[in-house]
Image (tube, rainbow, N blue to C red):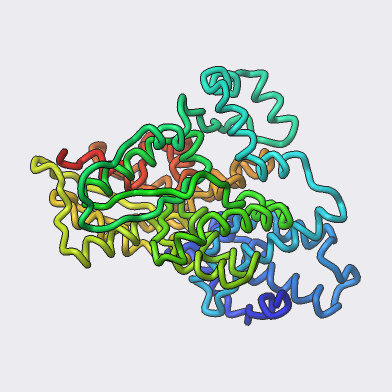
């Protein structure tokens, strides 16, 4: 299976395009053939075929040629051969670090859910401390860029807030299962709160299967055994809902699409497949409900706002941005346009890594940052990925928000 995936690349060079699409952000930023998907696939092919002296997945040369792969999954959709370099890189990182040792930084990122759970016990103190010079120095020592701002800790976990709520009344448009991701749970519970607000206004009841990390950070860092444990736990929690035919929605594209895409090879089985098929991004779900039920979104009558969309890379590669555009265009008064932005450059934890910080900013400057700087001051900017919103805030003066936040903001309630 690994050999087949590597040999999907036929060398057509589509990864060298510059003006549109997502693939390949590292080449678009550097204009160096060494940074293309083709170069990475060629290196992997040479090792598998035994054409290099170091014919295994643990040598330094292979690690180096993959280090600037942002695992954006752009090649999964933009490449005619659908090469999934993100998945291949995770496998290589597993083999490389199994031999050479996993860095402390990789373990920190892979266990961000546990660290967030710890920080949430004293959220005010933890948020204050991570902004201090001492905390930045400590993080710098393990290879985390001190220029980056870490997400704040919420005063109350989303699941705790949810337990205190009662969704009374009738819900003519059914029920949906909300997957609670790590950042919704510990850092930005307002995303979940706004989801209830919008869904309830559309006649939809929201239920959950409780909080559980999807394991995306562990996959990205090559800690695949740990990722499998989390995947099995989450599949077990979500399967009863999938078995009953319920739709499972998620707000963080990389999380919900990991369940839908990578779980099928990470923990294959009929239960995994059922869960994967039940999963939708929030925009996909809302677009279907609005179209199927003929709902007119209940927006405020006084708005006339230009709205611009920056799509998350995994979203563009797997589910597309058309559903988001459909939902936005269902709001009377929104003048909607998608930015030809490519990758933001943050790519989950990639932009937090000290040695990648400058390159991450360089990727953002290729298309996204200049486009945002040209936006009207009063325009609304939608970016569903947390890493995208963080990068936009860091690299420009224009704040971005999740689709669900914008909908809740202009909801006529």
Residue 365 in view in this figure: no
Please tell me which residue is depicted at 79% across the width and 47% down the height of the picture: 102
Q: Position of residue 43 (x, y in %)?
A: 75, 70
Please tell me which residue is depicted at 15% across the width and 41% down the height of the picture: 412
Instruction: Report the side of 105 relative to 380 (left or right).
Output: right
Instruction: Report the side of 385 relative to 75 (left or right).
Output: left
Q: Position of residue 41 (x, y in %)?
A: 69, 72
Q: Is residue 166 above or below residue 290?
A: above
Quadrant of the image for the C terminus? top left
Please tell me which residue is depicted at 27% across the width and 58% down the height of the picture: 174
Q: Position of residue 406 (x, y in %)?
A: 28, 43
Q: Position of residue 296 (x, y in %)?
A: 14, 56
Residue 145 in view in this figure: yes
- Front residue of 308/252: it is 252
- Front residue of 64/318: it is 318
- Front residue of 194/330: it is 194
Please tell me which residue is depicted at 65% across the width and 44% down the height of the picture: 356
User: Which quadrant of the structure image shows residue 82?
Assistant: bottom right
Total marks in image: 0
User: Which quadrant of the structure image shows residue 1?
Assistant: bottom right
Farthest left residue in view? 301
């Amino acid at each position: 299976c690994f050999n087949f995936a590597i040999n999907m690349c036929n060398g057509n060079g589509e990864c060298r395009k510059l003006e549109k699409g997502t693939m390949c952000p590292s080449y678009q930023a550097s204009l160096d053939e060494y940074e293309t998907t083709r170069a990475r696939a060629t290196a992997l092919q040479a090792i598998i075929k035994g054409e290099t002296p170091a014919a295994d997945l643990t040598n330094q040369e292979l690690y180096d040629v993959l280090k600037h792969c942002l695992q954006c999954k752009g090649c999964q959709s933009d490449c005619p051969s659908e090469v999934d370099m993100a998945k291949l890189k995770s496998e290589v990182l597993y083999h490389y670090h199994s031999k050479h040792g996993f860095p402390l930084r990789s373990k920190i990122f892979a266990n961000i859910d546990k660290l967030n759970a710890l920080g949430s016990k004293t959220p005010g103190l933890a948020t204050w401390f991570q902004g201090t010079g001492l905390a930045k120095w400590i993080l710098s020592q393990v290879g985390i860029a001190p220029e980056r701002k870490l997400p704040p800790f919420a005063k109350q976990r989303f699941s705790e807030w949810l337990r205190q709520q009662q969704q009374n009344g009738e819900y003519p448009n059914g029920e949906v299962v909300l997957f609670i991701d790590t950042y919704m749970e510990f850092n930005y519970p307002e995303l979940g709160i706004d989801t209830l607000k919008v869904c309830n206004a559309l006649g939809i009841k929201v239920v959950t299967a409780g909080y559980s990390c999807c394991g995306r950070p562990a996959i990205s860092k090559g800690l695949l055994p740990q990722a499998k444990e989390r995947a099995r736990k989450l599949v077990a929690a979500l399967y009863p809902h999938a078995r009953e035919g319920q739709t499972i929605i998620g707000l963080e594209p990389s999380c919900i699409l990991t369940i839908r895409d990578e779980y099928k090879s990470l923990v294959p089985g009929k239960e995994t497949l059922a869960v994967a098929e039940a999963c939708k991004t929030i925009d996909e779900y809302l677009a279907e409900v609005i179209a199927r039920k003929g709902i007119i979104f209940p927006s405020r009558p006084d708005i006339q706002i230009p709205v611009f969309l920056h799509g998350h890379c995994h979203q563009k590669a797997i589910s597309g941005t058309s559903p988001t555009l459909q939902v936005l265009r269902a709001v009377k008064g929104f003048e909607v346009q998608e930015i030809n932005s490519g990758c933001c450059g943050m790519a989950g934890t990639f932009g937090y890594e000290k040695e990648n910080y400058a390159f991450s900013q360089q990727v953002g400057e290729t298309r996204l940052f200049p486009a945002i700087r040209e936006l009207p001051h009063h325009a609304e900017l939608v970016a569903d990925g947390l890493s995208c919103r963080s990068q936009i805030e860091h690299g420009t003066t224009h704040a971005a928000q999740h689709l669900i936040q914008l909908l809740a903001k202009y909801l006529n309630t």
